[in-house]
């Protein structure tokens, strides 16, 4: 792969990975983590985030993306 963003996203070593723009992803291979945290903006220190499965995590993520895009359109 040549896109470092994709390589970072698919890195399964259990590290906390900087995705840029204040978004972080924590992936731990072989473990189910019932909670983690999310950053609402670049300077946010993070707040707890609970999820029950990958589908919920993705649904919530894309809902947040849509919300941010709508906020950006209004500016």
Image (tube, rainbow, N blue to C red):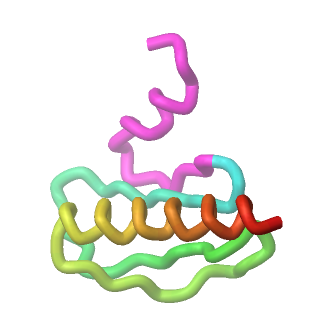
- Is 21 on the left-hand or right-hand side of 64? right
Name the outermost residue toward the front.
74
Pinpoint residue 37: horizontal percent, then vertical percent. 48, 78
Residue drawn at x 70%, y 80% is 45
Pinpoint residue 23: horizontal percent, then vertical percent. 60, 59
Residue drawn at x 47%, y 57% is 25
The quarter holding residue 12 reads top left
- Is 20 on the left-hand or right-hand side of 57? right
Quadrant for the C terminus in the image:
bottom right
Pinpoint residue 13: horizontal percent, then vertical percent. 37, 44
Magenta stretch: residue 28 in it?
no
Name the outermost residue toward the top.
2
Quadrant for the N terminus in the image:
top left
Magenta stretch: residue 7 in it?
yes
Does 55 sit above or below residue 2? Answer: below
- Is 61 on the left-hand or right-hand side of 53? right
Does 7 sit above or below residue 66? Answer: above
Q: Nearer the viewer, residue 63 or 36?
A: 63
In this figure, what is the number of numbered marks? 0
What are the residue bounds of the magenta stretch? 1-19
Residue drawn at x 30%, y 65% is 59
Residue drawn at x 54%, y 19% is 3
């Amino acid at each position: 792969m040549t896109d470092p963003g994709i390589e970072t996203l698919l890195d399964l070593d259990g590290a906390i990975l900087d995705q840029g723009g204040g978004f972080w992803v924590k992936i731990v291979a072989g473990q189910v983590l019932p909670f983690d945290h999310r950053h609402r903006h670049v300077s946010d220190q993070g707040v707890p985030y609970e999820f029950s499965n990958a589908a919920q995590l993705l649904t919530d993520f894309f809902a947040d993306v849509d919300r941010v895009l709508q906020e950006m359109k209004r500016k």
